[in-house]
Amino acid sequence: MHASRLFLFVVALAATAAAAPAAGAPPVSSRSLDDYRHFRALAIDLLGRMPTRDEIAAFERPDFAMDAWIDGHLQGSTYAERLSRIYMDLLRLEPSPSTQFAPDATTLYRHQVQGPDGKPVWIYYRPRQRRTREETDGEFCLTKEETGLDIAARMQPKEPGGAKPVTKAVLEQHTVLVKPWWLYRDYLNVQPTRRYKMGWDDPDPSYQPVEGLLNDPDGKPTMEVRVCREEAQAMPTGHVYVTGRTPPPKGTPLPHGRTRPAPLDSAYAKLHKGEVLACQSKLAVDSSAECGCGVALEHCLPNDGDQGGSAAFYFPNHIPLGLGQPIDTARQQGQRWFPFWWSQEAEHLLSHVFTADRDFREVLTARYTFVNGPLAQFYRAIQPGNCCGGEANFGMVQETEPLFLPSNVPTELFPHDVASWKMVPDRGPHAAGLLTTPMFLEKYASARARGATLYTAFLCKSFSSENAELTPSTEPNLMVRPGCQSCHATLEPLAAYFSRIEPGNLVYLPQQLFPVKNEKCKKGPNGQLPGFCNAFYDVAFADATGATLRSAYGSPAHADATPAGAGHDITKMPEFSECAVQRVAGSFLGRTLTSDDAPLVRELTSTFTRDGHRMRPLVRAILRSDTYRRANNLDSSVWRGGAK
Amino acid sequence: MSPLRSAAIALGAAAIAGCGPKELVPPQVGPKLTVTSTSTQDSAPKEELRMVPAEAYMRTYLALFGGLAPLEVQKRARGGDGAQLFDTWDDYFSSLGFPDYRIDMPRSQQTNALMVATFERLGVALCDRAVEHDLKAKPPVSERVVFAFDEAAGPAPLDRAAFESRFDVLHRTFLAYPVKLAPTERAARFFKLYGDVHARHAKAGGKARFSPDEAAWASVCYGLVRHPEFHLY
């Protein structure tokens, strides 16, 4: 039996047992109005809705066992959703509309050209793809002379004087036909046959490519897509490509309809000419003409247009009742596809902690997570394309210690399996609950934002500035600068935990290659660091012996402890448990707790820690407390213990 | 002495005093305060009722619509009337108080005018569709989600006893407790509402979409689905 079904069965059984009337018991209610209101509040908090008439009738029976009813519904999905909501309201783990995740290495766009017969044809390409043909190196694979398409002016073929038919020879020389992963369920086969809704008849209903990816320009179903030849390459490795090209004289017009000059050889390429490199890396896009998007283009995400405004899939904007009950569905840009699933990963992780009644500290420490098909594709094939550029100067040409080891991604998940979620028991040694999920790291993009969120959300503390005069200062150490120190003395060490995760690309900087104090990055006589250091090391904390890793100066020890250390250290603090109790109790009572509630908080915190930081005993204690029962009663006499 | 001269002298004296040494007021013991009356300070915590979370409101709404998915409810609520009765859930998302994590919009903890208007619009849509489903189509009572009772047998309005037994069903449906525990005037007020609407529609002579009895029950439903007790807990 599927786990969730078993779960529902247990809940139903418990609820039925609680509500089962004794044989012949008269349905006479001796319940008071307060009893009914209490039951309604419990239903709203545990069932996620008001009680039905049948549930009220069951409640009215004399043998209705309230405690058993509560226990039965402390197992339910709506209970887990209720608790997840507390932390989702705090952390807001959804990508903003401006979140764009479209690395050059893993994104396919397309231009429309005229085929040899004059009919429109779409050709997919990767921005900045290296090609051995100088005219198109780092650009679309066909020139303006071949297509009549002025890409620089964003001229589309429909416009007068625009495109001209591409000859068959040019088309075949520079492009190939591919059966891509987004159209074929069996895309890994040599000859895929199960095309979306044409042989693959049972796709997940939530997997919905946009029409532009399903149909050709003439409206017929797309069976194959035409792709620039280099992008269709599927070798796992390539070689560092060096052209010896020199920069064109200043003012030289761009030839062949190029949008930018042909790429020059990077310092890394010059040093490593001809060396083997992994194709699943950012470096490969920049430095090799032999690397493409892999088998069936599975390392790349398609778009139905030329960058701005193009779309890839339908998925909802709002899912207030969960993924299974969307309130809308919208045509979305490809760059929002993975961020959408990052958010769902965070939800699944939180939900699991509450559903399975795990130790709540796992929210910050767990190495496990949950992935579906798109996330499996992301961790296996997309994230590796985020590294490495400047990191190569420190000897990292592909991620050596990723937050989520691609080898730990379930192999049985296909990119189309949007509704199939699998538990991954271990992401890798650097994983730390929510803290190393892409959603947390993207939502809180700087080390300070991440540290501050830990402090406020999980310790219930806030930063309040001292009443100090802000005087002009050149002191870079905010832990001592007047006016800043009161907050930053705490914030900088917290931020240091996250200094090994690059802002914006989720790349982990290993200690071996990126020591906190790096002798390679000595401050020169001009007061500057070597240029390649600036992205990773802070000139404000450098001297003639080396520079300090960015964000690490507050605590080099915390930098090496990594987010996993943050999770460990924060959950050991006594404020962590008390904060969790305050968050949960405040949510169920519908108010901020005050000093008047100190005895209740002490008692609940004791329950919470004694029971292994599990939420179910805590919530049970809250729901059974007189404080909860009276929480919706305005009558102040009740608080004084007097008559109602 | 003229008032003008008096003012000038006063101003001059004040100016001289301002320039001189500060006057010292020696401390002195005042008379003892006497108790004239006593009152008890109410130190009890003052709490407001909680708003039903938007998620719970929406789940309840879906349940009252027959346990359908949100998009199916949207489709049925709009029916053949387009946006006359119901727009889209997306239109109501913010005004229902849902947080929008994407733009860091927090959950609404208090009602506002737009939210109350949304509750009204959604409530009317629910009640009207329920009248169509339960009272017009006349399925077996066991299949009726909202109006789970027999409608009036004839064109005459129900009497008070017949009304109250049916009103109790609606009261339990929306407010989750029997009407006998409600404030004593509630049943009478709703009976008057039922009677008034019934009479007005009867007078209109069948031009309306609903029969007098249906329109009367719809208005009772409107009153309950928008009741403060429905939205607070």
Image: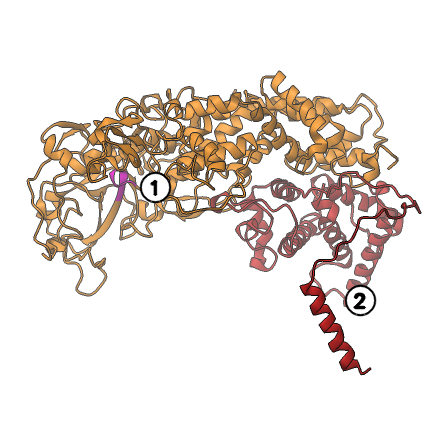
Chain colours: A orange, B red
Residue A191 at least partly seen: no
> Residue B80, percent across and down?
57, 57
Task: Kindly identify the residue that appears in the image at 31 percent across and 52 percent down.
Answer: A308
- Residue at image mark 1: A101
Span shown in magenta: A103-108
Crowdedness near tag 1: few (<14), some (14–19) or many (≥20) residues, C-alpha within 10 Å = some
Q: Residue furthest bottom?
A: B2
Amino acid type at circle 2 is Lys
Q: What percent of the width, then of the height, locates residue A200?
A: 35, 34
Q: Position of residue B1 (x, y in %)?
A: 82, 82
Circle 1: element type: loop
Q: Is residue A314 left or right of residue A577?
A: left
The reply, left or right, for residue A641 in relation to residue A388 is right
> Numbered disc 2: what chain?
B
Residues at marks 2 and 1 touching, judged by CB atoms closer than 8 Å: no
Height in image: B58 above or below A522?
below
Q: Residues within 10 Å of mark 2 (few under 14, many from 20)?
A: few
Seen from the viewer's position, the closer of residues A483 and A11 is: A483
Q: Label 1 sits on what residue type?
A: Phe
Q: Pick whichever, A274 or B138, lies toward us.
A: A274
Looking at this rendering, what residue extends furthest in the front direction? B20
* Residue, disc 2: B203
- Chain holding disc 1: A
Alpha carbon distance from label 2 to label 1: 64 Å
Taking the spot 56% from the left edge, 58% from the top edge, the residue there is B82
| Residue A543 visible | yes
